[in-house]
Image: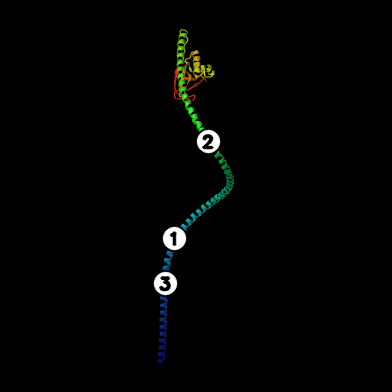
Amino acid sequence: MFDKKLVALSLICVVLCVAVVGALIVVNQKDYELQTKADQISGLEDENLSLESQIATLQFNISDLQSEITSLNNEKTALENQVSTLQANISSLQTEVTALENEKSTLEMQISALQDNISDLQSEIVSLNNDKTALEDQVVTLQSEITSLNNEKTTLENQVSTLQANITSLQTEITSLEDEVIESYQLGYDAGYAQGVEDGAGSGWYIRDPTYDEAIDFIDSDRTDENEYTDDYVCYDFTADFNANAFQMGYRCGFVYMEFLDGAHAIACFNTTDRGLIYIEPQSDKIVDVAVGRIYIGGIIVKMGIIW
């Protein structure tokens, strides 16, 4: 009985030992599994930290990418605008190309026409060269004639010099004669005036300056301008007759003499009571404006005077 109990205890001990060993094995297995899980958890935490770091990096990269996307969108918009501008430029260039092609066609036609003209001009050049040869021969002939004419010119210049000397002498004589005529007229005028004063003394006859209207009426009525200019009836005679007719009407009329560089001339004048001095060309009955230094009948007046 004791043996059975011992056996039973032994069995129990064996069972307990087996159970303890099994429990230890299980505990060890659990510890291993727990350690493995802990290691896995640690690994996962490390991976989580790595992933969080990667996520932060990715978020930063995403922010940069968004900025780049915005920049790229702006560049895209700018490029689209450039493309639109380039398309417009291409359209304009195509139009210009078309115009240039038309101009090219026109120029080609002009070149063809010019080539034809060149051919014609070459023919004309040949003809002109022939004409040139003929003209050169004529030039030689003309040069000979020019030499002959130069000789004749020299002879004529000598003759002209002689004639100019004669003209100078004649002008001196003419000036002297004009002075004598003026002096004679003055003497005759003074004598006639004195005689007229003597003849008219006590008769109520007198000479006066006319008004402007009276002078114009007399000029219109006077017929001296109808006389013919001849070698024997010149400007002095026209003026003398005009003055005499004015005297007969009771008007005081001046004898105006003018000297030019190469001659002289005579006209008349009235000292009107309302408009002052007026000058009259007796040959045409025109009121004229004369003074020293002015041009009259083609010459410059260098000297002038009035004889009343």
Report x, y in % for residue 251: 48, 14
Per the rendering, the mark at residue 64 is 1
Q: Is residue 188 above or below residue 86?
A: above
- State how far apart marks 3 and 2 are (Cα): 130 Å
Give the residue type at disc 3. Gly
The mark closer to the camera, 1 or 2, is 2
Report x, y in % for residue 174: 47, 20
Report x, y in % for residue 142: 54, 36
The mark closer to the camera, 3 or 2, is 2
The mark closer to the camera, 3 or 1, is 1
User: According to the image, label 2 marks what residue?
Assistant: 144
How packed is label 2: few (under 14 Cα within 10 Å), some, or many (20 or more)?
Answer: few
Give the residue type at disc 1. Asp
Q: Secondary structure at mark 3?
A: helix
Front one among 48 and 229: 229
Give the residue type at disc 2. Ser
User: According to the image, label 3 marks what residue?
Assistant: 43
Upstream in sequence: badge 3 or badge 2: 3
Q: Residue sitting at 44 percent across and 62 percent down? A: 61
Q: Is residue 140 visible?
A: yes
How packed is label 1: few (under 14 Cα within 10 Å), some, or many (20 or more)?
Answer: few
Q: Secondary structure at mark 1?
A: helix
Q: Is residue 45 above or below residue 160?
A: below
Per the rendering, the mark at residue 82 is none
